[in-house]
Image (cartoon, grey):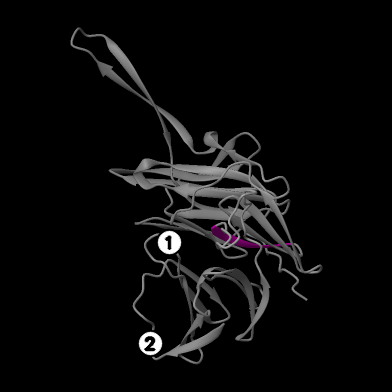
Amino acid sequence: MRWKIYKELPKEMYERAEFHDNKIWLQRLYSIYEKRGRLFLIDLDKEQVMEAVPHHGNIMDFHIQLDGTIIAMTSYETADELWICRKKDWHFLSKIDSYMEIPPDFDESKIRPRSRLIKLFPWKSEIVILSVNSIIRYSINERKWNKVKLSEDIIIQNDMHTVITSSGIIFLGYDHGEFGGKLLKIDIETGSVEDLEWAVKFESSMEHITSDGKIEIWYNTYSFPVTGIIINPSDPDKIIYSLGLFHCYEDGGIFHLHEREKELILNFPAKQLKSSGRSFYAANYEKLFLSLKMEGTENLNLG
């Protein structure tokens, strides 16, 4: 991994931005349309633009520690890797054990298939990686990998939101726009995948008067798009998530997720929900809501 310096920021379709220590990190995500994930750093003090460039590969995801350390996962034609950056110096950490199970009659002359990587999470003294069919965990202290197969394969798409709780539960939300959404609960210990349909579904009814004067009631059930997920700061084992529908009309809200029910905390159709340590904000196309009741977060000990 190396740095490439630009006079100005390249014209790209940036899909993620993070701010830390007067620096802005911008990422163009890997997708079915963009076959290369790119990561840029804008140093506001030095007025400098830099790109983290892997050797013949692309950056799939990154995480900024509270001390400014960067953890990144990269994908190459022959392997996936973990890298770490301290004070702008990149160092190789480990190859990712992303290889899929193969049948006994597999042709060894072919490249062994790998699972597509979705998201990287620092968690306690580990780095947890979610792929489409497994949980891949790297122990910082023991420097070894552990892999658990998911109970079912999951779909990867552009508009996804993910967090990991203190107890090792990953929540993955989908935003399908006018076609609704989905919220999955994934246990990193067992690989169990649970579809929390009740957390995104709403029922509505509409009365209709027929030609003979009778009243008919039409019922409809709709799954709302998940537009954001954050950890609940008062309980790091729980999440707060937002639902928002922006097609012909605006509807949705921000909710606490309990064990078997959702609690509305703000009747605000959010397009985006973000946490910044002690506060969080929710925004849509017209309004911005800011909460000042958040608490601090933990930092992963990387030695």
Magenta span: helix, strand or loop, mainly? Answer: strand
Q: Residues within 10 Å of mark 2 (few under 14, many from 20)?
A: few
Q: Position of residue 276 (x, y in %)?
A: 57, 65
Find numbered disc 1 in the image and state the secondary structure of the residue it sits on.
loop
Q: Which mark is residue 197?
A: none
Q: Is residue 287 above or below residue 58?
A: above
The tally of labels here is: 2
Which three-letter amino acid code belongs to the residue tagged 2?
Glu
Pick the residue in front: 283 or 23. 23
Q: Is residue 178 left or right of residue 150?
A: left
Which range of residues does the magenta coloring cover?
A: 116-123
Q: Position of residue 103 (x, y in %)?
A: 62, 48
Q: Position of residue 250 (x, y in %)?
A: 35, 45
Q: Is residue 31 left or right of residue 63?
A: left
The question of residue 139 being in magenta is answered with: no
- Residue positioned most to the top: 212
Q: Quadrant of residue 263?
A: top right
Give the residue displayed 75% in from the left and 62% down from the top: 124
Give the residue displayed 56% in from the left and 54% down from the top: 162
Q: Is residue 130 left or right of residue 216?
A: right
- Which residue corresponds to mark 2? 8
The question of residue 120 being in magenta is answered with: yes
- Which residue corresponds to mark 1? 31
Which three-letter amino acid code belongs to the residue tagged 1?
Ser
Pick the residue in front: 215 or 287. 215
Give the residue displayed 57% in from the left and 60% down from the top: 119
Q: Position of residue 245 (x, y in %)?
A: 38, 45
For the C terminus, the quadrant is bottom right
Find numbered disc 2 in the image and state the secondary structure of the residue it sits on.
loop
For the N terminus, the quadrant is bottom right
